[in-house]
Amino acid sequence: MRLLAVAPLAASLICLAACASGGARPPVGGDQTVPRPDVRERPPAPRRYLASRRTGAVTLDGRLDDSAWGRAVWSEAFTDIEGPIRPGPRFRTRVKMLWDDQYWYIGAQLEEPDLWATVRERDAVVFRDNDFELFVDPSGSTHRYYEVEMNQLGTVWDLFLPKPYREGGQADNGWNIAGLRIAVALAGTLNDPRDRDRGWTVEMAIPWAAFADSGRNVVPPRAAAQWRVNFSRVEWDVDTIRGGYVKRRDAEGKPLPEHNWVWSPQGAVNMHLPELWGVVQFGGATVTRDVANDRIRWQLRRIYYAERLYRQAHGRFAGDLQLLGLSRLPVAVQLTATDSTWDASVPAGAGTFTWHIRDDGLTRHE
């Protein structure tokens, strides 16, 4: 087993067109900026994980064999990004998490018979190699979220999104995690097709300060706080040519699309749908579920999807739920709209606060 320890490197400010996929292959058809229509009609059931508080030391060597990790449970195995409508992944991927007052610890185990990597520059497009990716929305607003990618060399791409690409968001590659600690352990030999490898493991310690966002987020999270989180794995099919790994190509000589395997399925080939990410809870006896507020938020999200489609068809937004085909929503919605903007709101239980969603998808309560 070969160990690769990674320290922070200088940033390079690049963002290619590929940024918009965030590790996902280009849309094959339909509107991949929103989930499939049948997914929109019912509240999603994101995967959930209870992250335990760390007890015992964690040595960042990529091995995940410290006693502290032994007390952390594994997540479910990753699935296809679109969920059960697609074949399941060929190789198992799973994660486990811990936390303390300074760091969020993430461990990942990825089965892989062919270890290879080429990207070595910090903030380059890491998913051109097989990679492991983390997505984090601390506020649950679907705006101001974070992405971290790494390959088997331990090369890191960390970026900040003020809003999703579907709303014109531009990745800030100048955002770098100060004090990020990462180690990668390889069970096999890198870039050598002569043997059959077993896989690789990733160990991360992310300082909570990375997610403070100038005081917008509470870090470390309060007890039993829940963040929207997802993990993704990009996997390319490869062939061995002249003693090296080469991406498999189609009849026209183009690389085949990559596979996208995720912890919590997205329902579309797009990682940048934060409203569909999983839920990570930091501490507590069990993961809690706020069914009433989840229901309100999802009905507001349905309005967002419908308004996007209506504007595509008519060049303006609608101020009437009936025009959107949503006249029978199970919550009392107040919708106000002009041709170019809209806002929808629903009071929460007992009128203690009101949920809002606006035309760019930002969700908030006040």
Image (spheres, rainbow, N blue to C red):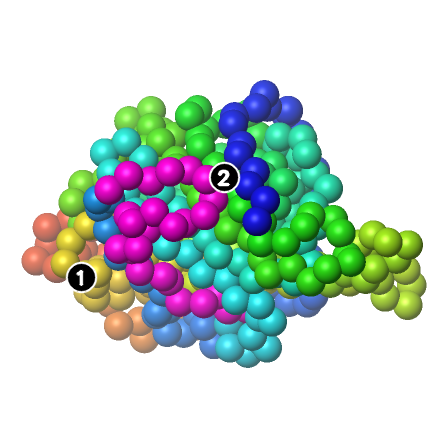
Q: Position of residue 134 (x, y in %)?
A: 47, 47
Query: Within the image, what quadrant is residue 331 found in?
Result: bottom left
Query: What range of the chain is rendered magenta?
Result: 56-82
Front in this rendered view, residue 254 or 45: 254
| Above or below, 187 relative to 8 | below
Residue that carries the numbered disc 1 in the rendered image: 286
Q: Amino acid at mark 2?
A: Ala
Q: Position of residue 152 (x, y in %)?
A: 61, 45
Estimate how packed mark 2 is, as few (under 14), some (14 to 19) or many (20 or more) residues with alpha carbons within 10 Å. many
Label ID, residue 183: 2
The C terminus: image quadrant = top left
Front in this rendered view, residue 114 or 299: 114
The main secondary structure of the magenta stretch is: loop
Query: Within the image, what quadrant is residue 303 found in?
Result: bottom left
Q: Which residue appears at 8% of the width and 58% of the height?
A: 350
Front in this rendered view, residue 210 or 340: 210
Q: Is residue 106 left or right of residue 221?
A: right
Number of marks:
2
Q: Is residue 197 left or right of residue 248?
A: left
Q: Secondary structure at mark 1?
A: loop
Which residue is farthest left? Answer: 350
